Image: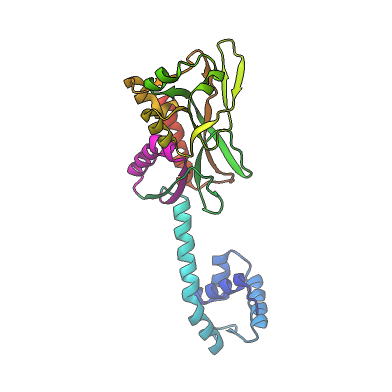
Amino acid sequence: MSVNYQDLYYFIKVVEKGSLVAAAKYLDIPTSTLSRRMQAFEQELGYKLIHRSAKKFGLTESGQRFYSSLSGVITELETRVEDVNSELSSLSGDIKVTAPVSFGHYYVKEWVFEFMEQNPKISVEMFLSNENVDLVKNSIDIAFRLGEVTLNDWVSRSLFDSAMVMCAKPSLIEQFGEPRTPEDLARLPLIVLKRTAFWRFHDRDGHAVTYTPKAHLRTDEIMFAKEAVKRGIGAACLPRYVVNNALESGEIRSLLDDWSLQSKPVQIMYPHRESLPVKTRAFIDFVIDKVRESGY
């Protein structure tokens, strides 16, 4: 037998308020409507719940057992609903965030740490992965992605463009020669990121050249590629933020300085909802403000 849960809720409130009139006022519905709903509920159950008379209100034996068994469940549900509403409308609760591994270490971790320090009632579950995490299956609230990414029912907002740089260890350049054009890269052993099919260069006049690298070493992890470059395993096209310190120290060198590489957009993504939870909106706004302040 299926139960009309709204009528069950009405019955609980009738008992708590002590009369149909008081319950109807609390529920903001006409007393006559509430009376009809209670009669229909009794017919649905197959037994009477309420004694009705002009002078007094009371429960039948069945009604008393029914109320005693279920009133605690309704109270618990109301408490949980209030807790959820409080969480969704305040800066508390859990946020699930995902990002690529290296980007997470270089940028996202600082944003998350500072945001949590400012909002101690918020807990964060962090997924760092170079695989495409199933955002829906894992109930992700916020995702950071590099490159042009679009997903149905998700909002994508651009944060900044991540500059790319071709780089290698000086000894590797001495061994294989300085490349002058993208095609000259064929002389060098190359380290290629797993999802990179080609590198797109532009010369000073804006002319584009697309080069498809043959990998001497292929990896899905940027930090692994960086360490390989530093060891002289090969040359690689990497985000500038990853190798900037090594470039400044001279440990590695940039290549093809007369050519520019197509940058990768960094995006923050979140589910398309009419009203995001306050905690989610607050983190999004926090990240956007940090990016603006830093001027990436």
At which x and y percent is residue 49? 58, 84
User: Which of the 4 quarters of the picture holds residue 197?
Assistant: top right
- Residue 60 visible in image: no
Which is more toward the observer, 9 or 203?
203
Type of secondary structure dominating the magenta stretch: helix
* Magenta-drawn stretch contains 95: yes
Residue furthest toward the bottom? Answer: 61
Q: How many numbered dots are placed on residues in this image?
A: 0
Residue furthest toward the top? Answer: 205
At which x and y percent is residue 224? 41, 37
Which is more toward the observer, 219 or 27?
219
- Residue 220 visible in image: yes
Residue furthest toward the front? Answer: 175
Is residue 124 positioned above or below 29 on the image?
above
> Taking 219 as reference, is 249 left or right?
left
At which x and y percent is residue 240? 43, 25
Q: Magenta part of the protein: which range?
A: 92-120
Is residue 245 positioned above or below 129 on the image?
above
Q: How was this image coloured?
A: rainbow
Q: Which residue is drawn at 58% across and 74% down?
A: 8
Q: Residue at x 54, y 15 (%)?
A: 181
Q: Which residue is drawn at 50% across and 71% down?
A: 74
Which is more toward the observer, 251 or 275?
251
Which is more toward the observer, 63 or 211?
211
Which image quadrant: the C terminus? top left
* Magenta-drawn stretch contains 96: yes
> Taking 47 as reference, is 254 left or right?
left
At which x and y percent is residue 258? 50, 12
Which image quadrant: the N terminus? bottom right
Is residue 259 positioned above or below 92 on the image?
above
